[in-house]
């Protein structure tokens, strides 16, 4: 007879398949955080003086701050010893950085291949441009030339600082200021690399852009910084994916992503986050404390966030939109899946400033095992935002009876013409549903993943085609047979 | 001809309470058996147990299906071996299209028999053919499984699924409940068109009405977890006329 509990256990014991370590020589800073370390990072990257100053301002501000504890994490999170983290770790290179794929360390390429993203193959087949960040530095950016023909800049953040300093200086920190919040401020002080995208006026980026983040070295934090600018009428779709080896210590990932959309520009930002979640007892795993925000500066601009979050011990992030331009649109589509002892407090903020601004939020939270999953969202309609519209739909799916789903919607309306709708549902994955599927010949595991994928459909369909399949697989793997 | 389904002395409990108390039933290929009985007699329990629902304790007895121990199989295995249950209350599965759902089911069953998967085009051809049987609109297939279906649509969809999956044993659990007479005829026509010398049917119903349209070879009366009387189709008519109380008396079955 079918034994749901056994299947649940089997799933809980599923191994994290991306947990291997690459044995590669690294060029690292000593652990700890100080002005000297920041100067070290800045010097390593050969940065201009203004950037070092910006980092130091952030650091000095950070020293005056204390870590936030308002998030809903029933199990809390361990104190983070910022002095034991290594803030800079780079795979050792011969001489200067790689000029092309041929110069990249084969071991690194192997790692990416293991992760299922063979750079060369992706170049050939998918037409996806990939920027791969390994610990602290960007390793290879593919397809650069094809993009350059269109005037699209897609490179590592460090390279952007060197090659396009005026653009970086113009936009850096304009959406997430260095003083924004504890982890964003820390990031501003110590960020090491990340991606930079610039799509000039009127250009539709000819391919999906993609970054792959990988934490490899022990005791390193990953502090990447991504900046995407779409000028008037430009459009771009960007995707990031993340994995990390299995380790018993918690590792900090504190990234910052800033998006800027000018008039009629459109930015679509998709995330498939699969950082190591810790083992089934909650040991180890990534603390994913990330600040993501987009600014629709221009009229009729459009920013869309899609995230599929299955990894990390703790996920704590709110990809948000500041809808400043009239008729601008912000969207947030999220699947957050937590199992075992994972905790997630995630959602979005939609700040309506311009007239006729619209926002759309679809959040799907799935909890299994002993996990806790919270949706936290703010819809703010300012006085200036005539005829603002928001629709929020927030659904939770529970698997088993030891997990929790929580919803914290904040609605702040200061203009009487606003229309704000919020719908929320909580359901338990039914034995009836599973039995119905198995009675038709479908295995219990496939039944669960089919039901969950159905639950997430509205979000998954927002992912770029090339990655929808990947997300689908990932959910199935993270989900197999979790029924109580 | 040898039996397709052989139930011997089946005892089933739920939370310590015995629901089926020594049930015997044999179905041969080509036969249509009907089980009738008052509410709470154990009709639906029998259907669920045969399909492999795990919330029941089987305390005694055996069920052999085409020579294999049915009780030893998981529900999906039973389905692959040819057991189909048309549910009394088909559940909704939001976000999963009926076509996608049936594709998974058809291919799981094919894989079980070592056959290649059918591709989308072949499947659609197969679906179209079966849709005519129960007057299913193509639109229904594009919608999520049972989501927002009317009562009649759900029952027709069950029979459609049954036709698509082509099972050896069809169990219909109160398929007539909640159907108006037109819908009932459509469902019955669908079932009748599937009658064949290789297929067995177990039609569970509370009312005789359905049996005007699906004419059974055998009728069994289930009371208090036991079959207390068996006969031909005329037994159903007697029951309709006299009610279940009439059955209780001569057999003396009681709690």
Image: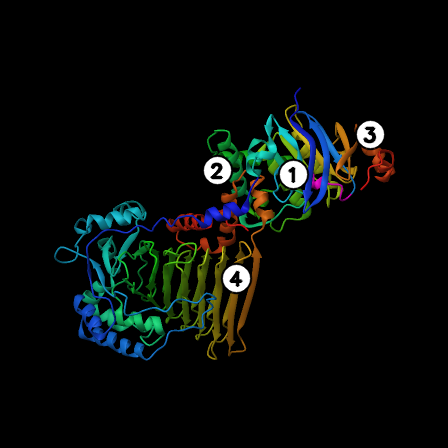
Question: Residue A225 is drawn in which quadrant?
Answer: bottom left
The residue beneath circle 1 is B58
Question: Circle 3: is it few (<14), some (14-19), or many (20+) Cα within 10 Å?
Answer: few
* Mark before the other along the chain sequence, 3 or 2: 2
The residue beneath circle 2 is B120
Label 2 resides on the chain identified as B
Label 3 resides on the chain identified as B
Give the dominant element type of the magenta stretch: helix, strand or loop. Answer: helix
Q: Which span of residues is magenta-colored? A: B39-50
Foreground label between 2 and 4: 4
Numbered disc 2: secondary structure: helix
Numbered disc 1: secondary structure: strand
The residue beneath circle 3 is B234
Label 1 – label 4 distance at C-alpha: 36 Å
Q: Foreground: A164 or A453?
A: A453
> Is residue A422 on the magenta stretch?
no
């Amino acid at each position: 007879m079918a034994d749901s509990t056994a299947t649940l256990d089997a799933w809980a014991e599923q191994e994290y398949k991306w947990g291997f370590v690459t044995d590669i020589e690294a060029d690292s800073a000593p652990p700890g955080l100080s002005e000297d370390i920041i100067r070290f990072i800045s010097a390593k990257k050969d940065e201009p003086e203004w950037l070092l100053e910006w980092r130091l301002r952030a650091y000095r501000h950070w020293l005056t701050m204390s870590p936030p504890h308002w998030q809903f994490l029933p199990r809390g999170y361990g104190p983070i010893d910022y002095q034991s983290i290594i803030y800079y770790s780079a795979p050792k290179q011969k001489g200067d950085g790689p000029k092309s794929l041929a110069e990249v360390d084969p071991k690194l390429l192997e790692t990416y291949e293991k992760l299922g993203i063979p750079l060369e193959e992706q170049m050939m087949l998918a037409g996806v441009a990939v920027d791969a960040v390994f610990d602290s530095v960007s390793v290879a950016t593919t397809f650069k030339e094809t993009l350059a023909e269109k005037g699209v800049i897609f490179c590592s953040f460090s390279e952007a600082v060197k090659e396009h300093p005026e653009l970086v200086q113009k936009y850096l920190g304009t959406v997430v200021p260095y003083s924004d919040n504890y982890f964003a401020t820390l990031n501003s002080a110590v960020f090491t690399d990340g991606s930079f995208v610039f799509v000039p006026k009127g250009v539709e980026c000819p391919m999906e852009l993609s970054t792959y983040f990988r934490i490899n070295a022990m005791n390193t934090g990953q502090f990447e910084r991504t900046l995407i600018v779409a000028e008037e009428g430009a459009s771009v779709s960007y995707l990031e994916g993340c994995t990390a080896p299995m380790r018993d210590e918690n590792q900090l990932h504190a990234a910052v992503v800033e998006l800027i959309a000018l008039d009629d520009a459109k930015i679509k930002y998709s995330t498939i986050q699969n950082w190591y979640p810790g083992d089934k007892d909650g040991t180890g795993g990534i603390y994913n404390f990330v600040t993501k925000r987009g600014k629709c500066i221009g009229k009729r601009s459009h920013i869309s966030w899609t995230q599929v979050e299955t990894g990390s011990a703790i996920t704590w992030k709110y990809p948000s939109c500041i809808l400043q331009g009239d008729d601008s649109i912000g969207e947030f589509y999220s699947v957050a899946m937590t199992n075992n002892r994972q905790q997630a407090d995630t959602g979005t903020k939609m700040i309506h400033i311009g007239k006729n601004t619209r926002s759309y939020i679809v959040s799907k939270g799935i909890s299994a095992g002993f996990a806790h999953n919270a949706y936290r969202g703010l819809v703010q309609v300012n006085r200036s935002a005539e005829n603002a519209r928001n629709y929020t739909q927030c659904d939770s799916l529970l698997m088993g009876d030891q997990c929790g789903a929580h919803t914290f919607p904040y609605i702040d309306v200061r203009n009487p013409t606003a229309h704000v709708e919020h719908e929320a549902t909580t359901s338990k994955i039914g034995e009836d549903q599973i039995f119905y599927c198995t009675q038709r010949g479908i295995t219990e595991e496939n039944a669960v993943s089919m039901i969950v994928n159905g639950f997430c459909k509205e979000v998954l369909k927002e992912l770029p085609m090339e990655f929808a399949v990947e997300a689908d697989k990932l959910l199935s793997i993270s989900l197999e047979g979790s029924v109580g | 001809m040898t039996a397709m389904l052989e139930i011997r002395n089946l005892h089933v409990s739920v939370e310590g309470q015995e629901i089926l108390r020594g049930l015997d039933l044999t179905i041969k290929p080509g036969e249509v058996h009907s089980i009738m009985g008052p509410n709470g007699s154990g009709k639906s329990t029998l259907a669920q147990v045969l399909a492999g629902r795990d919330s029941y304790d089987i305390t005694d007895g055996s069920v052999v299906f085409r020579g294999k121990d049915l009780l030893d199989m998981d529900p999906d295995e039973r389905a692959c071996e040819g057991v189909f249950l048309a549910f009394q209350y088909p559940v909704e599965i939001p976000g999963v299209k009926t076509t996608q759902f049936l594709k998974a089911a058809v291919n799981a069953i094919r894989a079980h028999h070592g056959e290649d998967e059918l591709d989308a085009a072949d499947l659609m051809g197969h679906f179209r053919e079966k849709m005519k049987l129960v007057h299913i609109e193509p639109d229904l297939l594009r919608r999520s499984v049972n989501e927002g279906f009317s009562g009649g649509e759900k029952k027709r969809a069950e029979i459609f699924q049954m036709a698509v999956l082509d099972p050896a044993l069809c169990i219909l659990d109160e398929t007539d409940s909640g159907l108006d007479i037109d819908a009932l005829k459509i469902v019955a026509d669908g079932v009748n068109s599937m009658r064949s010398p290789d297929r067995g049917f177990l039609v569970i119903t509370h009312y005789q009405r359905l049996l005007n349209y699906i004419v059974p070879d055998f009728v069994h009366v289930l009371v208090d977890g036991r079959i207390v009387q068996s006969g031909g189709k005329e037994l159903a008519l007697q029951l309709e006329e006299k009610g279940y109380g009439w059955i209780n008396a001569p057999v003396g079955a009681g709690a």
